[in-house]
Image (cartoon, grey):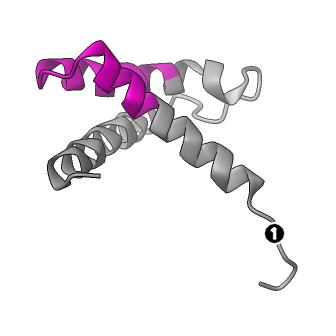
Amino acid sequence: MPPARMARTLYLDLLHELTHLRQLDEGLDLWDERFAYVHRPTEIEGHAVAIEEGRRLGMTSEDVSDHLAALWMGSHVESSTPRFPNG
């Protein structure tokens, strides 16, 4: 990944996580199990904040889709990584 794209991805990820810190400070339930992870209002807002900033920075619809796909790919890879006891 080119350095400029990596920096933008990191910036947007930080905005997403900072949104969660604000939500937590406001008393919102970040782990509301009434919703699947991807349908939690707090997650939707976190992604919306990052997407809005990406658009402000000039990201195209394709750029936004690529950014979101990379996030989900990472989650998929992480969740499919075998876990070994004591290691």
Q: Can residue 69 be spotted in the picture?
A: yes
User: Residue at the location (37% across, 19% down)?
Assistant: 48
Residue located 15% across and 48% down the image: 4
Q: List the residue tagged with mark 1.
A: 83
Q: Secondary structure at mark 1?
A: loop
Q: In screen coordinates, is 62 left or right of 38?
A: left
Among all residues in the image, which is located at the extreme top?
61
Quadrant of the image occupied by residue 78: bottom right
Horizontal side of residue 63 vs 21, given as left or right: left
State the image coordinates of residue 5 (x, y, percent, origin top left): 22, 44
Identify the magenta region: 44-68
Q: Which residue is farthest right?
A: 85
SS majority, magenta: helix
Left/right of residue 13 with respect to residue 42 in the rendered view: left
Q: On the rendered structure, is 38 left or right of 14? A: right
Which residue is at a point 72% across and 20% down the rendered structure image? 35
